[in-house]
Image (cartoon, coloured by chain):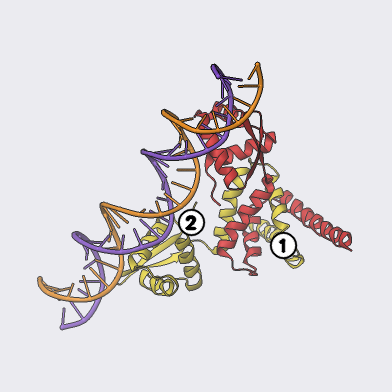
Chain colours: A yellow, B red, C orange, D purple
Amino acid sequence: MILGDLEKRVLQFLWETSEADAKQVHVALTKRRGGALNTIQSTLDRLFKKDLLTRQKQGHAYYYRARVGKEELVAQLIQNVTCDFISEGEDSLIAAFSSFSAGLDDDKLSQLEKLIQQQRQLRSQEVSDAD
Amino acid sequence: MILGDLEKRVLQFLWETSEADAKQVHVALTKRRGGALNTIQSTLDRLFKKDLLTRQKQGHAYYYRARVGKEELVAQLIQNVTCDFISEGEDSLIAAFSSFSAGLDDDKLSQLEKLIQQQRQLRSQEVSDAD
DNA sequence: ACACAAAACCGACTGCCTGTCGGTATTTGT
DNA sequence: ACAAATACCGACAGGCAGTCGGTTTTGTGT
Protein backbone atom coordinates (compact mmCIF):
# COMPACT_ATOMS: atom_id res chain seq x y z
CA MET A 1 0.00 0.00 0.00
CA ILE A 2 1.43 3.29 -1.13
CA LEU A 3 0.19 6.52 0.35
CA GLY A 4 0.84 9.93 -1.14
CA ASP A 5 1.58 13.05 0.85
CA LEU A 6 -1.89 14.44 0.60
CA GLU A 7 -3.43 11.13 1.53
CA LYS A 8 -1.31 11.04 4.63
CA ARG A 9 -2.29 14.54 5.63
CA VAL A 10 -5.92 13.73 5.16
CA LEU A 11 -5.58 10.66 7.31
CA GLN A 12 -3.81 12.65 10.00
CA PHE A 13 -6.60 15.15 10.00
CA LEU A 14 -9.28 12.49 10.26
CA TRP A 15 -7.51 10.86 13.15
CA GLU A 16 -7.58 14.16 14.97
CA THR A 17 -11.14 15.01 14.08
CA SER A 18 -12.74 11.58 13.94
CA GLU A 19 -15.28 12.73 11.39
CA ALA A 20 -15.42 15.30 8.62
CA ASP A 21 -16.76 15.95 5.16
CA ALA A 22 -14.72 17.02 2.17
CA LYS A 23 -15.35 20.68 2.79
CA GLN A 24 -14.06 20.55 6.32
CA VAL A 25 -10.99 18.63 5.30
CA HIS A 26 -10.42 21.09 2.54
CA VAL A 27 -10.67 24.10 4.81
CA ALA A 28 -8.37 22.50 7.31
CA LEU A 29 -5.69 21.50 4.84
CA THR A 30 -5.97 24.40 2.46
CA LYS A 31 -4.56 26.84 4.97
CA ARG A 32 -1.20 25.18 4.56
CA ARG A 33 -1.25 24.21 0.96
CA GLY A 34 -4.02 25.64 -1.13
CA GLY A 35 -5.68 23.48 -3.77
CA ALA A 36 -9.19 22.84 -4.90
CA LEU A 37 -11.96 21.16 -2.99
CA ASN A 38 -12.17 18.64 -5.78
CA THR A 39 -8.70 17.48 -5.07
CA ILE A 40 -9.68 16.68 -1.52
CA GLN A 41 -12.76 14.88 -2.72
CA SER A 42 -10.69 12.73 -5.03
CA THR A 43 -8.28 11.97 -2.27
CA LEU A 44 -11.02 11.03 0.15
CA ASP A 45 -12.51 8.83 -2.52
CA ARG A 46 -9.22 7.12 -3.16
CA LEU A 47 -8.69 6.51 0.52
CA PHE A 48 -12.21 5.16 0.70
CA LYS A 49 -11.52 2.80 -2.18
CA LYS A 50 -8.39 1.69 -0.39
CA ASP A 51 -10.59 0.74 2.54
CA LEU A 52 -8.86 3.19 4.81
CA LEU A 53 -11.97 5.31 5.35
CA THR A 54 -15.64 4.73 5.91
CA ARG A 55 -18.28 7.20 4.80
CA GLN A 56 -21.84 7.97 5.59
CA LYS A 57 -24.12 10.48 4.02
CA GLN A 58 -25.46 13.26 6.17
CA GLY A 59 -27.39 15.86 4.26
CA HIS A 60 -25.59 16.66 1.08
CA ALA A 61 -22.22 15.34 1.90
CA TYR A 62 -20.44 12.20 2.88
CA TYR A 63 -18.89 12.22 6.27
CA TYR A 64 -15.69 10.29 6.41
CA ARG A 65 -14.05 8.45 9.24
CA ALA A 66 -10.79 6.60 9.41
CA ARG A 67 -11.47 2.89 9.32
CA VAL A 68 -8.20 2.08 11.01
CA GLY A 69 -6.34 3.85 13.77
CA LYS A 70 -3.01 5.49 13.23
CA GLU A 71 -1.12 2.85 15.11
CA GLU A 72 -2.91 0.08 13.31
CA LEU A 73 -2.10 1.56 9.95
CA VAL A 74 1.51 2.18 10.83
CA ALA A 75 1.73 -1.38 12.01
CA GLN A 76 0.31 -2.56 8.72
CA LEU A 77 2.76 -0.45 6.77
CA ILE A 78 5.59 -1.85 8.83
CA GLN A 79 4.36 -5.32 8.05
CA ASN A 80 4.33 -4.45 4.37
CA VAL A 81 7.90 -3.27 4.17
CA THR A 82 9.21 -6.09 6.31
CA CYS A 83 7.30 -8.83 4.52
CA ASP A 84 8.73 -7.69 1.22
CA PHE A 85 12.14 -8.61 2.47
CA ILE A 86 11.69 -11.27 5.02
CA SER A 87 10.55 -14.74 4.16
CA GLU A 88 7.83 -16.08 6.37
CA GLY A 89 8.84 -17.45 9.68
CA GLU A 90 12.25 -15.94 9.29
CA ASP A 91 13.70 -14.32 12.33
CA SER A 92 14.91 -11.35 10.39
CA LEU A 93 11.67 -9.76 11.38
CA ILE A 94 13.16 -9.61 14.78
CA ALA A 95 16.46 -8.53 13.37
CA ALA A 96 14.74 -5.68 11.63
CA PHE A 97 13.34 -4.70 14.93
CA SER A 98 16.76 -4.81 16.31
CA SER A 99 18.11 -2.37 13.78
CA PHE A 100 15.16 -0.19 14.38
CA SER A 101 15.65 -0.17 18.09
CA ALA A 102 19.14 1.16 17.53
CA GLY A 103 17.49 4.46 16.77
CA LEU A 104 15.68 4.58 20.08
CA ASP A 105 16.88 6.17 23.26
CA ASP A 106 16.85 4.48 26.65
CA ASP A 107 13.46 5.81 27.56
CA LYS A 108 11.93 4.37 24.45
CA LEU A 109 13.57 1.06 25.08
CA SER A 110 12.02 0.96 28.50
CA GLN A 111 8.67 1.85 27.08
CA LEU A 112 9.06 -0.92 24.58
CA GLU A 113 9.71 -3.40 27.33
CA LYS A 114 6.64 -2.25 29.16
CA LEU A 115 4.60 -2.66 26.02
CA ILE A 116 5.83 -6.16 25.60
CA GLN A 117 4.77 -6.94 29.13
CA GLN A 118 1.38 -5.41 28.43
CA GLN A 119 1.08 -7.45 25.31
CA ARG A 120 1.70 -10.59 27.28
CA GLN A 121 -0.77 -9.64 29.91
CA LEU A 122 -3.34 -8.83 27.27
CA ARG A 123 -2.92 -12.29 25.90
CA SER A 124 -3.23 -14.18 29.11
CA GLN A 125 -6.41 -12.20 29.70
CA GLU A 126 -7.76 -13.13 26.33
CA VAL A 127 -7.01 -16.73 27.00
CA SER A 128 -8.89 -16.74 30.28
CA ASP A 129 -11.70 -14.83 28.61
CA ALA A 130 -11.96 -17.53 26.03
CA ASP A 131 -12.16 -20.25 28.65
CA MET B 1 12.20 5.64 -0.58
CA ILE B 2 10.13 3.43 -2.80
CA LEU B 3 11.48 0.13 -4.03
CA GLY B 4 10.00 -1.81 -6.91
CA ASP B 5 9.67 -5.57 -7.01
CA LEU B 6 12.67 -6.11 -9.20
CA GLU B 7 14.77 -3.79 -7.10
CA LYS B 8 13.87 -5.78 -4.04
CA ARG B 9 14.76 -9.06 -5.68
CA VAL B 10 18.08 -7.69 -6.77
CA LEU B 11 18.82 -6.51 -3.27
CA GLN B 12 17.88 -9.88 -1.86
CA PHE B 13 20.23 -11.57 -4.25
CA LEU B 14 23.09 -9.25 -3.42
CA TRP B 15 22.60 -9.84 0.27
CA GLU B 16 22.93 -13.54 -0.35
CA THR B 17 25.87 -13.27 -2.70
CA SER B 18 27.67 -10.26 -1.35
CA GLU B 19 29.06 -9.38 -4.76
CA ALA B 20 27.95 -9.81 -8.35
CA ASP B 21 27.95 -8.17 -11.74
CA ALA B 22 24.91 -7.53 -13.88
CA LYS B 23 25.31 -10.76 -15.75
CA GLN B 24 25.34 -12.86 -12.64
CA VAL B 25 22.35 -11.11 -11.24
CA HIS B 26 20.61 -11.55 -14.53
CA VAL B 27 21.30 -15.25 -14.69
CA ALA B 28 20.19 -15.71 -11.11
CA LEU B 29 16.93 -13.79 -11.47
CA THR B 30 16.08 -14.73 -15.01
CA LYS B 31 15.37 -18.31 -14.10
CA ARG B 32 12.28 -17.14 -12.29
CA ARG B 33 11.18 -14.25 -14.42
CA GLY B 34 12.90 -13.85 -17.74
CA GLY B 35 13.76 -10.39 -18.98
CA ALA B 36 16.72 -8.78 -20.61
CA LEU B 37 20.14 -8.21 -19.17
CA ASN B 38 19.65 -4.53 -19.82
CA THR B 39 16.76 -4.42 -17.42
CA ILE B 40 18.99 -5.73 -14.68
CA GLN B 41 21.64 -3.22 -15.55
CA SER B 42 19.16 -0.39 -15.31
CA THR B 43 17.93 -1.67 -12.01
CA LEU B 44 21.41 -1.99 -10.62
CA ASP B 45 22.13 1.51 -11.81
CA ARG B 46 19.02 2.88 -10.16
CA LEU B 47 19.84 1.16 -6.92
CA PHE B 48 23.34 2.56 -7.18
CA LYS B 49 21.97 6.06 -7.68
CA LYS B 50 19.77 5.54 -4.67
CA ASP B 51 22.92 4.85 -2.71
CA LEU B 52 21.83 1.35 -1.88
CA LEU B 53 24.68 -0.30 -3.77
CA THR B 54 28.35 0.28 -4.27
CA ARG B 55 30.19 -0.74 -7.41
CA GLN B 56 33.69 -1.37 -8.49
CA LYS B 57 35.00 -2.19 -11.89
CA GLN B 58 36.71 -5.51 -12.39
CA GLY B 59 37.58 -6.23 -15.98
CA HIS B 60 34.70 -5.28 -18.19
CA ALA B 61 31.98 -5.14 -15.64
CA TYR B 62 30.98 -3.39 -12.48
CA TYR B 63 30.71 -5.55 -9.46
CA TYR B 64 27.98 -4.47 -7.16
CA ARG B 65 27.63 -4.84 -3.43
CA ALA B 66 24.84 -3.83 -1.14
CA ARG B 67 25.85 -0.71 0.73
CA VAL B 68 23.45 -1.44 3.55
CA GLY B 69 22.47 -4.69 5.19
CA LYS B 70 19.01 -6.10 4.96
CA GLU B 71 18.17 -5.30 8.53
CA GLU B 72 19.53 -1.83 8.20
CA LEU B 73 17.45 -1.15 5.14
CA VAL B 74 14.33 -2.60 6.66
CA ALA B 75 14.93 -0.44 9.69
CA GLN B 76 15.26 2.59 7.46
CA LEU B 77 12.06 1.74 5.65
CA ILE B 78 10.30 1.32 8.94
CA GLN B 79 11.56 4.71 9.98
CA ASN B 80 10.21 6.16 6.75
CA VAL B 81 6.71 4.90 7.17
CA THR B 82 6.56 5.78 10.83
CA CYS B 83 8.06 9.24 10.45
CA ASP B 84 5.47 10.09 7.85
CA PHE B 85 2.81 9.73 10.47
CA ILE B 86 4.45 10.40 13.74
CA SER B 87 5.71 13.80 14.71
CA GLU B 88 9.15 13.79 16.23
CA GLY B 89 9.39 12.93 19.83
CA GLU B 90 5.88 11.60 19.79
CA ASP B 91 5.30 8.41 21.60
CA SER B 92 3.18 7.02 18.83
CA LEU B 93 6.34 5.54 17.49
CA ILE B 94 6.16 3.29 20.43
CA ALA B 95 2.47 2.83 19.97
CA ALA B 96 3.10 1.72 16.43
CA PHE B 97 5.47 -0.82 17.80
CA SER B 98 2.79 -1.90 20.10
CA SER B 99 0.35 -2.58 17.28
CA PHE B 100 3.03 -4.35 15.44
CA SER B 101 3.92 -6.54 18.36
CA ALA B 102 0.32 -7.68 18.44
CA GLY B 103 1.19 -9.77 15.41
CA LEU B 104 4.03 -11.53 17.14
CA ASP B 105 3.88 -14.74 19.05
CA ASP B 106 5.30 -15.29 22.51
CA ASP B 107 8.61 -16.51 21.21
CA LYS B 108 9.10 -13.39 19.18
CA LEU B 109 8.19 -11.25 22.12
CA SER B 110 10.84 -12.95 24.18
CA GLN B 111 13.35 -12.47 21.41
CA LEU B 112 12.45 -8.83 21.29
CA GLU B 113 13.09 -8.48 24.98
CA LYS B 114 16.44 -10.10 24.57
CA LEU B 115 17.29 -7.72 21.78
CA ILE B 116 16.40 -4.78 23.91
CA GLN B 117 18.73 -6.07 26.59
CA GLN B 118 21.44 -6.49 24.01
CA GLN B 119 20.86 -3.01 22.76
CA ARG B 120 21.29 -1.66 26.26
CA GLN B 121 24.44 -3.63 26.79
CA LEU B 122 25.80 -2.45 23.49
CA ARG B 123 25.28 1.09 24.61
CA SER B 124 26.88 0.83 27.98
CA GLN B 125 29.85 -0.67 26.19
CA GLU B 126 29.99 2.21 23.77
CA VAL B 127 29.88 4.64 26.63
CA SER B 128 32.78 3.01 28.40
CA ASP B 129 34.64 2.82 25.10
CA ALA B 130 34.23 6.54 24.73
CA ASP B 131 35.57 7.21 28.19
C1' DA C 1 -43.45 19.41 -7.00
C1' DC C 2 -39.90 22.43 -8.27
C1' DA C 3 -35.95 25.05 -8.44
C1' DC C 4 -31.66 25.91 -6.54
C1' DA C 5 -27.47 24.98 -4.30
C1' DA C 6 -24.27 21.73 -2.85
C1' DA C 7 -21.94 17.81 -3.45
C1' DA C 8 -20.76 13.63 -5.96
C1' DC C 9 -19.03 11.76 -9.98
C1' DC C 10 -16.44 11.37 -14.29
C1' DG C 11 -12.76 11.98 -16.98
C1' DA C 12 -8.68 14.22 -18.31
C1' DC C 13 -4.02 15.70 -17.74
C1' DT C 14 0.57 16.07 -15.31
C1' DG C 15 4.45 14.31 -12.98
C1' DC C 16 6.95 10.73 -10.95
C1' DC C 17 8.61 6.09 -10.54
C1' DT C 18 9.68 1.30 -12.06
C1' DG C 19 10.20 -2.11 -15.58
C1' DT C 20 11.58 -2.87 -20.07
C1' DC C 21 14.76 -2.88 -23.77
C1' DG C 22 17.03 -1.27 -28.40
C1' DG C 23 20.83 1.06 -30.09
C1' DT C 24 25.20 3.23 -29.52
C1' DA C 25 29.41 4.51 -27.26
C1' DT C 26 33.26 2.72 -24.31
C1' DT C 27 36.23 -0.08 -22.47
C1' DT C 28 39.22 -4.12 -22.15
C1' DG C 29 41.82 -8.17 -23.24
C1' DT C 30 44.24 -10.36 -26.96
C1' DA D 1 43.87 -2.49 -33.89
C1' DC D 2 40.06 -5.54 -33.34
C1' DA D 3 36.36 -8.00 -31.43
C1' DA D 4 33.65 -8.90 -27.62
C1' DA D 5 31.75 -7.54 -23.48
C1' DT D 6 29.77 -4.03 -21.02
C1' DA D 7 28.21 0.58 -19.92
C1' DC D 8 25.40 4.30 -21.14
C1' DC D 9 21.57 6.91 -23.25
C1' DG D 10 17.20 7.45 -24.38
C1' DA D 11 12.67 5.93 -25.16
C1' DC D 12 8.24 3.92 -24.06
C1' DA D 13 4.51 1.58 -21.16
C1' DG D 14 2.05 1.06 -16.98
C1' DG D 15 0.69 2.48 -12.53
C1' DC D 16 -0.32 5.80 -9.02
C1' DA D 17 -0.97 10.40 -6.73
C1' DG D 18 -2.25 15.16 -7.30
C1' DT D 19 -4.96 18.33 -9.68
C1' DC D 20 -9.12 20.21 -11.33
C1' DG D 21 -12.99 21.42 -14.92
C1' DG D 22 -17.39 20.10 -16.22
C1' DT D 23 -21.61 17.42 -15.69
C1' DT D 24 -24.84 14.82 -13.14
C1' DT D 25 -27.04 13.62 -9.06
C1' DT D 26 -29.12 14.61 -4.74
C1' DG D 27 -30.98 17.15 -0.66
C1' DT D 28 -33.55 20.93 0.95
C1' DG D 29 -36.44 24.78 1.44
C1' DT D 30 -40.42 26.99 -0.38
Residue A123: x, y in percent? 68, 57
Q: Which of marks 1 and 2 is nearer the N terminus?
A: 2
Task: Kindly identify which residue carries mark 1.
Answer: A104
Q: Distance between the residues labelled 1 and 2?
A: 25 Å
User: Callout 1 environment at 10 Å: few (<14), some (14 to 19), or many (20+)?
Assistant: some
**Quarter occupied by residue C29:** top right
Residue in the image at 67% along x and 56% along y? A127
Q: Which amino acid type is marked by label 1? A: Leu
Chain on which label 2 sits: A
Q: What element carries label 1?
A: loop
* Left or right relative to B124: residue B97: left
Residue in the image at 71% along x and 53% along y? A99
Q: Can residue A131 be seen in this view?
A: no
* Residue toward you, B86 or A120: B86
Q: Quadrant of the C terminus of chain A?
A: bottom right
Chain on which label 1 sits: A
In the depicted structure, whether residue D28 falls above or below residue C8: below
User: Callout 2 environment at 10 Å: few (<14), some (14 to 19), or many (20+)?
Assistant: some
Task: Kindly identify which residue carries mark 2.
Answer: A3
Q: Is residue A9 visible?
A: yes
Q: Which amino acid type is marked by label 2? A: Leu
Residue in the image at 68% along x and 50% along y? B72
